[in-house]
Structures are given as C-alpha cells and as structure tokens.
Amino acid sequence: MESTMKTVFLVDDDITNLKIGISVLGDKHNIITLNSGARLIKMLTSTIGSANLPDLILLDIDMPEMNGFETISRIKEVEKLREIPVIFLTAKTSDKNELEGLDLGAVDYITKPFTATLLSKRIEIHLQLAEQKKELIRFNTLLKEMVDEKTKAVIELQNAILQTIAEMVDYYDDSTGSHIVRSQNYLRILIESLQKSGYEHDALADIDVELVVQSSQLHDVGKIAIDDKILRKPGKLTDEEYEKMKKHVLAGGKIIEKIKTRTTQHKFLEQAMIMATMHHEKWDGSGYPHGLKGEEIGLLGRLMAIVDVYDALVSERPYKPAYSHEKAVEIIRISSGTHFDPILVGAFLSVSDEFKKISNMSREGAHDE
C-alpha cells in the first residue's frame, strides 16, 4: 500500500534541533534533515521533475554561509520550486525579521522554543492548504481544457458559417469561386513579408495574422446587396451600373456593423470593417467610397487593395481575359504612389513570385474540377 505520509525537509545547522525535529515529527511525516541552505538548494535542484520534492520545508534563519532569507530567495527564483510551502524556524522575535521572511514568500514563522503540538499543528495546516492549492490548480487546468475545447468548437462553427457566407458571395462574382481563398493566402504572404522587412507601423504591431486572414473573408460581403445582373454581367458595366456596384463597400460596412451589435468579437469585426470599407480607396485619394488619401486609409485596407487588384487582374472575368502574372505585377508597380502605398508595393514585389504560385495552383485546381 502506497504511503500517505508527507515529506518534510528540516533545514538547521544545529544537529540537536534536527534530532528534536525527527523525534517530534517522525511518526507523522517523512523527515529529511539537512544542515545547510546550500545543501537544501543542491538537493532541490537535483530532484526537480521527480516525485522526490518535499511537500513542505522547515527552514532555520540563523545559519552560516547561506542564511534562511538567502535560501528562500534562491528557492523562489525557480518556477518548479516556488510553490513548495516554507515555514521559518527561528529564535528571532522582531516584527521586522518576521515581515522580511513573509515578504520573501514564507507561509509561516515559528519562534523557538516551540512545543511539539504547536509545530505539528502548524505543519498539518499548511500541508492541507498546499494540497487544496494543488487540487485547485488541477481543477482550473481541467476547467481550462474543457473551456478551450468548447471555445475551439465554437470558433470552428463560426469560421464554417463565415466561410460559407463568403463562398456564397464569391460564387456570384467569381467563376472559379475561389477568390476568397486566394485572397487569404495572398494577404498572409504580404503581411508576413511586411513584418520581416522591419516596417514599423502601430497597426502592424497589433496584427494577429491568422485573425486578419479569417476576417478578410468579409471584405466583399457587401456584394450580397448588389443585383446579380450587375455582378454577373458578361460585359463592361455602364456608368450607372458601376455606381451601383461601388455601393457594395458601404453595404459591407453596414452588414459588419450589424453583426457587431450581436457579438463581443469586436477586434475581428473592426479588422473586417477596415478591409471591407477601404479596399477600394486609393493612395492618391481618387478611390471610393470616401476618397481617403495616404495613411487615412487603414493599413489593412491598403494591403487588401493590392491583394484584391492582383487577383482581379490575373483572373478571368466575363468582361476580360486573365492577365499574365507579369502584366499584373507591372500594373501594380507603376501604380505605386497613385493607387497603392509605395511601401506596400515594395513588399508585394519582394514576394510576387509566391503570389504567382498561388494563382497558378488555383487555376490548375479549377481545370482539374
């Protein structure tokens, strides 16, 4: 039968005190005696990760070379040791010494001489508290695992719904139905390229790439509000039709704003809002819907502008053939400083070959279907 006795390390440079400790506590606990703080530290560090760590430490303060205060400070520096309860045993009775010991992390402070019953009771109380703390940690860990599992399931469901909505929009505006997926891949590559370049921008520092990639699925959600006859017209839009098409940006903003009133995931939706409402703005202020200029346009909107235009250029549409990758890159390059943020164009040019791979893979996949 496994022993239920707790292990207590008794540390004191006085051999008489060590013998008394064994005599008083040996019947109830597994007592390990050590005659210096240095030996205690050596034994503790050698047993980290094993089942041989003590359940409690009784530590004398007045010891040569390394006193109790120095010893507990060393213990608390080690993450896997700092939760072991330490009780100071000392002949010192000043409030200052007691407060110093408690400030360093001791759970109790017992002055010598002490009675056997008092010492035994104090140890019993702190062992119980330590066990309760371990149980609470185990419970919290289990609870966190359960919450993480539930949260993961909810996020997967949300992403599935979001992806389905995005694909529905995509279907009506893209013959291959994969504009959203390509855009996500392009955007991830472009953001990571910008991060590696050392570009400093407050918005870039706050970017969670995976969260942005997920939220980018809503950048064209406003097209739900556009007449199918306009979205799928097999030719160039009239001026009147083009003005109606431009309204998808504002419609997207209204849809996302409505979603915001029904959820707490505001950062996700704020990022989606920037991309949905600003990806048709232009660096020189000639874009729509608000004619924003330069950094008035959110960073994510400026990034999505490059991604969206590149994909439109290399994709076949009812009114145009697909341009070559090289032609698309040249159009974006010469639009630096007018349509696009010059710094972002530089980042795009550095990874344009990766854009080409994604574009080619998408076309090959479409041909295989």
Image: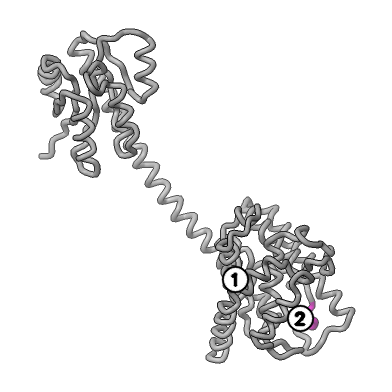
Vertically, is 101 above or below 44?
above
Q: Amino acid at mark 1?
A: Gln
x and y, in percent, of residue 96 in the image: 38, 11
Residue under label 2, please give it: 231
Location of the C terminus by quadrant is bottom right
Q: Judge from the rendering whether residue 74 lies leftward or rightward of residue 276; answer left or right.
A: left
* Image quarter of residue 185: bottom right
Residue interval drawn in magenta: 227-231
Percent of width and height locating residue 264: 63, 50
Crowd band around label 1 with a 10 angstrom C-alpha radius: few (<14), some (14–19), many (20+): many
Picture layout, residue 98 above or below residue 124: above
For label 1, the residue is 184
The residue lying toward the viewer, choosing from 326 and 126, is: 326
Residue 217 picture quarter: bottom right
Q: Is residue 230 magenta?
A: yes
Query: Quarter holding the N terminus?
Result: top left
